[in-house]
C-alpha cells in the first residue's frame, strides 16, 4: 500500500486551463505539504496543513489554492495555468519533527 | 531567512571510493537537519534526522554527522546503486517548523 499517493503522475495542459492534483496519505500523519521542484531540482515549500488547518502559505500566486477535506487528504487546484507553472509538484506528510514521506510527484507541463 | 548550501553539485566516484558530501546551513534556531535520497522520477526518500551538534547516524554505507554550521554525509565504499541525488534540509524552531531544502548533490558511482 502506497504511503503517500498523488494523482495524476503526469499532467499536460494548455495555458489558461484549470487543473487539480490530488494527494492522500495512509500514515496517520497530522501534517501535509505541497512542494514545487523546478528544473534545477530545487524543492520549495508552497503550503502546509496541520489537521486540516493551513499553517504555511509561502509567496505563491493566488491562482494556487490548496484544500484539505480531512487530515489524510490535501489537494492542489491551479487556476489559469501559465508556462512558468511547469514543474514537478510533490505532496508530503510528516509527524512532529520527523522526516517527510513524499509522494512520487506530479509532472505538470503547460504548453 | 534560512539557507542551505550543498557541495559539490555533482560527484563522480569509482565503486569503492569513499567520499563526503557537504551541507552548510544558516537557520534561525535548528530543530532538525534532514538528509534525503532522490532517484530520477521519484520523490525524495528520507534517510536521517540529526538534532544537535555532535550527533551521528548510520545506515549501511552512509553516515551523517552534524556540527553547528554544517553536516556531512560520508559514503564508505559506495556501490553503483548508491547513485542518486542527495538532498539536505533544515527545520527551524519557529512555530510553523518550516523546512528549507538545499539543491542537492548528484552522486554517480561507476562500476
Image (cartoon, grey):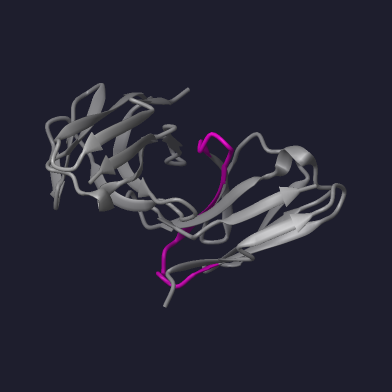
Q: Quadrant of residue A29?
A: bottom left
Residue A6, horizontal then vertical, whole percent: 57, 65
> Which residue occupies the foreground of this view, B80 or A37?
B80
The reply to whether the magenta stretch includes residue A1 is no
The mark tally for this picture is 0
Residue B51 visible: yes
From this viewpoint, which residue is outermost toward the right? A16
Q: In which quarter of the image is residue B45?
A: bottom left
Residue at left offset 26%, top offset 21%: B69
Horizontally, is A97 left or right of B111 in the view?
right
Residue B72, horizontal then vertical, whole percent: 21, 31
Quadrant of the snapshot with the N terminus of chain A: bottom left
Residue at left offset 42%, top offset 69%: A3
- Up the image or down, B52 lies above or below B68; here it is below
Residue A75, horizontal then vertical, whole percent: 64, 61
Residue A49 visible: no
Horizontally, is B96 left or right of A106 in the view?
left
> Which residue occupies the foreground of this view, A97 or B83?
B83
Residue bounds of the magenta highlight = A24-43
Residue B11, horizontal then vertical, whole percent: 31, 31
Residue at left offset 27%, top offset 53%: B81
- Up the image or down, A85 lies above or below A71; here it is above
The reply to whether the magenta stretch includes residue A39 is yes
Amino acid at each position: 500500500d502506497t504511503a503517500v499517493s498523488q494523482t495524476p503522475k503526469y499532467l499536460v495542459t494548455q495555458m489558461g486551463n484549470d487543473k487539480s492534483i490530488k494527494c492522500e496519505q495512509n500514515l496517520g500523519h497530522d501534517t501535509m505539504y505541497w512542494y514545487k521542484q523546478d528544473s534545477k531540482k530545487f524543492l520549495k515549500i508552497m503550503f502546509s496543513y496541520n489537521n486540516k488547518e493551513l499553517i504555511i502559505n509561502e509567496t505563491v500566486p493566488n491562482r494556487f489554492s490548496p484544500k484539505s477535506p480531512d487530515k489524510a487528504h490535501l489537494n492542489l487546484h491551479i487556476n489559469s495555468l501559465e508556462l512558468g507553472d511547469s514543474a514537478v509538484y510533490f505532496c508530503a506528510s510528516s509527524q512532529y519533527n520527523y522526516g517527510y514521506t513524499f509522494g512520487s510527484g506530479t509532472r505538470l507541463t503547460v504548453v | 531567512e534560512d539557507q542551505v548550501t550543498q557541495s559539490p553539485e555533482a560527484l563522480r566516484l569509482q565503486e569503492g571510493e569513499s567520499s563526503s558530501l557537504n551541507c552548510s546551513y544558516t537557520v534561525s534556531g535548528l530543530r532538525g537537519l534532514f538528509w534525503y535520497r532522490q532517484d530520477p522520477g521519484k520523490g525524495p526518500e528520507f534517510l536521517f534526522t540529526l538534532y544537535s551538534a555532535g550527533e551521528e547516524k548510520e545506515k549501511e554505507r552512509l553516515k551523517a554527522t552534524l556540527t553547528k554550521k554544517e553536516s556531512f554525509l560520508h559514503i564508505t565504499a559506495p556501490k553503483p546503486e548508491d547513485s542518486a541525488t542527495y538532498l539536505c534540509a533544515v527545520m527551524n524552531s519557529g512555530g510553523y517548523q518550516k523546512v528549507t531544502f538545499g539543491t542537492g548533490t548528484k552522486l554517480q558511482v561507476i562500476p
